[in-house]
Amino acid sequence: MHAINIRAAWEAFDADAPGPALRLGLPLDWSAVAWPEGRPPARVRLVRRFGRAPGVDPDASPRIRLRGFAGVVAIELNDAPVSFRDEDGWLVVDAVDLQPRNALTVLVDLARAADAPGLWGNRAFLEYD
């Protein structure tokens, strides 16, 4: 298995209003984020851009695994909704169709995310089997 850590270089946007992006790394404490409006939005759209891993077998089945992502409402890959499931505390997106350049978008309900114990988003991987 080949795994790539995707915890750094996320962009956060207010999901319900236009505005600038904030650069965030995971894990994070939502209460410590300096929001442009001075208060957190109700929903956050997190975007992580990444490329297909070089040197990985083209027949390998990639999947995305996220741990500690409380309050996730939806996940998209390259602007298309993808289904995900909870597997022992991990949010898992199976057999994703990766392009040379990709954008993973996670829509988060901050009220639900803020209620979760500990830091948010403590693990995030792109894996190839």
Image: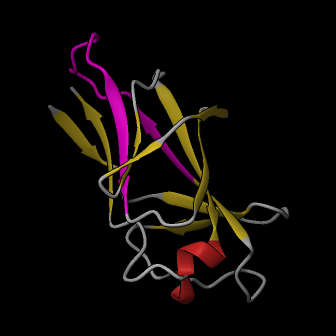
Colouring scheme, one of rainbow, by chain, secondary structure, one colour: secondary structure
User: Is residue 66 covered in magenta?
Assistant: yes
Examine the rendered structure and indicate whether residue 28 appears above or below residue 124. below
Q: Count up the numbered dots.
A: 0
**In-front residue for pair 18/15:** 15
Residue 74 picture location, percent across and down: 62, 48
Residue 7 picture location, percent across and down: 36, 58
Q: Quadrant of the N terminus?
A: top left
Residue 43 picture quarter? bottom right
Residue at 51% x, 33% y is: 102
Relative placement, left or right, of 15 versus 64 is right
Residue at 49% x, 66% y is: 70
**In-front residue for pair 79/67:** 67
Residue lying furthest left: 1
Residue 9 picture quarter? bottom left
User: Is residue 94 covered in magenta?
Assistant: no
Relative placement, left or right, of 3 versus 21 is left
**In-front residue for pair 18/93:** 93
Residue lying furthest right: 17
Write down the region rendered in magenta.
47-67
Residue at 35% x, 33% y is: 63
Q: Quadrant of the C terminus?
A: top left
Residue 87 picture location, percent across and down: 33, 48
Examine the rendered structure and indicate whether residue 115 appears above or below residue 64. below
Residue at 74% x, 73% y is: 42
Residue 14 picture location, percent across and down: 74, 66
